[in-house]
Image (cartoon, grey):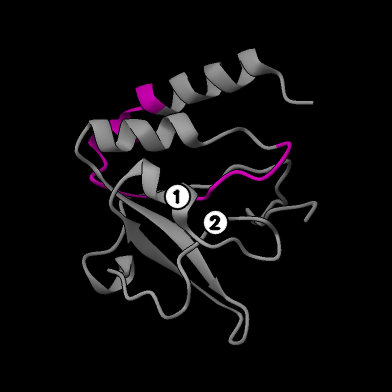
Amino acid sequence: MEDVNSNVNADQEVIAHSEYQKSKRISIFLSMQDEIETEEIIKDIFQRGKICFIPRYRFQSNHMDMVRIESPEEISLLPKTSWNIPQPGEGDVREEALSTGGLDLIFMPGLGFDKHGNRLGR
């Protein structure tokens, strides 16, 4: 069970961090169960006028790209993957981060990571 206070503290630490403050184009993974919730960070990205991208995983090609979303509310309207994560469908044409200026910051919550930064446990 996630500790609500830990989640609030993590949100505040991310939002206060100098790298976050100076970043304009941010990709953020949508949190899965038992991970630190990313919803408040996503809301803050939009409140500060930053550009937000989320992952879209293409199962057939085993490829992931980072695609733009226009509002936090849009997330609840997206179809869900087999992992129950909202993401734009493959036919949904969107701005792709690496084709249009890159990213300043990628935020990836997780339960644990190996020494190479790979997510563990899923």
- Where is residue 15 shown, x and y percent of the image? 38, 26
**Which of the 4 image quadrants contains residue 23?**
top left
Using the image as rendered, state which of residue 86 and residue 113 is in the foreground.
86
Q: 60 left or right of 2? A: left
Q: Assign a secondary structure to mark 1.
A: helix
Q: 86 left or right of 75? A: right
Any part of residue 28 in sight: no
- Where is residue 17 shown, x and y percent of the image? 37, 26
The residue carrying mark 1 is 75
Q: Assign a secondary structure to mark 2.
A: loop
Per the image, is 16 magenta? yes
User: Which amino acid is tagged 1?
Assistant: Ile
- Where is residue 114 shown, x and y percent of the image? 72, 51
Q: Quadrant of the C terminus?
A: bottom right
The numbered mark, 1 or 2, whose residue comes first in the sequence reads: 1
Per the image, is 92 magenta? no
**Which of the 4 image quadrants contains residue 96?**
bottom left
* Total marks placed: 2
* Residue 59 sits above or below residue 121 on the image: below
Residue under the image location 42 percent in, 80 percent down: 91
**Is mark 1 in CB contact (under 8 Å) with mark 2?**
yes
Q: Quadrant of the N terminus?
A: top right
> Which residue, as the protein is rendered here, is positioned at the far front?
77
The residue carrying mark 2 is 86
Q: 76 left or right of 83? A: left
User: Which amino acid is tagged 2?
Assistant: Pro
- First to last magenta residue range: 15-34
* Residue 17 sits above or below residue 110 on the image: above
- Where is residue 118 shown, x and y percent of the image? 66, 57
